[in-house]
Image (cartoon, grey):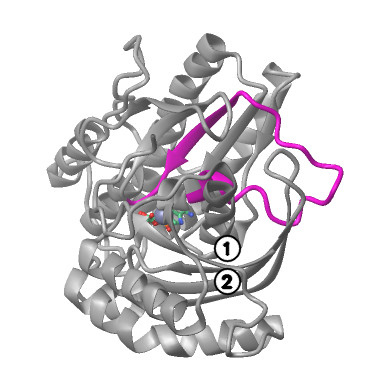
Amino acid sequence: MIILGIETSCDETAISVVEATGDINEPVFKVLSSTINSQVKLHKEFGGVVPNLAKREHQKNLPLVLKQALEEAGIEDDLKEVDLISVTVGPGLEPALWTGIGFAKELGEKYRKPVIGANHMLGHIASVLPEKGTEFKLKFPVLALLISGGHTELVFLKSWKEKEKIGETLDDAVGEAFDKVARMLDLPYPGGPEISRLAEEAREKNIKLDTKFPRPMIHSKDFNFSFSGLKTAVLYYLRNPQKYSRENDFVDSSQMAVAREFEDAVIETLLSKTKNAIEKCSPKTLIIGGGVIANKALRSEFLNLSETYKQLEILIPEKPLTTDNATMIAITGFIEYKLGNRLELEAKGNLEIT
Ligand code: KG4
Ligand code: ZN
């Protein structure tokens, strides 16, 4: 079947056309088109996403993004070949979510197509599935670490039907911590890629910080995270003129050293909690999803886990599918459709995985 995915939960207006064959246990997903219109430049001057501005941009962009997605997929604009429309209903910014939902419903009514709601975080899990071919079968149970701008959580899936959140952040999400620390370092929004770049340069040049930042909650027995203490530790460090001083307005080695130590603290914390969860839950597959896994150092550290856990299959999405996209929403819609789940077509900012 052909699925049209629509994603507007944050600052990307995205539409994908995905072909799904096979049943729920062995689906094969082929991406026919994936169009993303990013508003990052617009929100940059405000240092973060402004919900009503995002909403206005989604409204303006959706028809254009649809046209492009259909053209690239070679599909007529009367949606004759489309079997299902899948739209993100949460979590995310509600004004932004509503534009996608309204647009999906209009299309559904106009062309008489079924519309289904998708959970964005389930989407980040499903983002490892496209283009895997017929040989691939996802092995359950699955442990998923989701690390994005709004969420940090560990989810255990016995199957697509039986899923449970086993841990989450008690304060800031990891992407949010990246963005906030970047702002403290006078780096532009979104901060993740900026910190990542500086940390990499610091490693190449062997630049190290003279201080170790905390690895929050690394010894707690649960699977929860906390990143606000780490963020505060960075702030105190930067406020101490004996420790940190910028020589000029250009990127310098003191910024690089802070970026590297912050990134190391995050990586160590995420790895440690994930290892604990692997040992407790014995999953056959580990999936890491969400925008933060675009981080190169984090990707390689997580892939290295296969040396310790030889039987564990470790799946990380292709780079373009790490940050928000509509391909993952089309796939999630397919899964929900096949399971017979029908999420309400209403924006839910704090929608949980259940
Ligand atoms: O999943 P995503 O695109 O949107 C949400 O659902 O939140 O994640 C966006 C987050 C931002 O906080 C961004 O700074 C972070 O992912 N991010 C990164 C990198 N690329 C994006 N964080 C660390 N390193 C990166 N290379
Ligand atoms: Zn996301």
Q: Position of residue 327 (x, y in %)?
A: 57, 63
Quadrant of the image containing the N terminus: bottom right
Where disc 2 sits, the SS reads strand
Pointer 1 residue: 327
Q: Position of residue 305 (x, y in %)?
A: 64, 25
Q: Position of residue 47 (x, y in %)?
A: 22, 67
Q: Residues within 10 Å of mark 2 (few under 14, many from 20)?
A: many
How many discs mark residues in the rendered view?
2
Q: Nearer the viewer, residue 90 or 294?
A: 90
Pointer 2 residue: 16
Q: Are marks 2 and 1 in contact (CB under 8 Å)?
A: yes
Q: Residue at x 61, y 20 (%)?
A: 283
Cα–Cα gap, marks 2 and 1: 5 Å
Where disc 1 sits, the SS reads helix
Q: Identify the magenta region.
A: 123-149
Query: In this orientation, does residue 133 appear?
Result: yes
Membership of 137 in magenta stretch: yes
Q: Nearer the viewer, residue 61 or 22?
A: 22
Q: Residue at x 33, y 54 (%)?
A: 344
Q: Main secondary structure of the magenta part?
A: loop
Residue type at mark 2? Ser
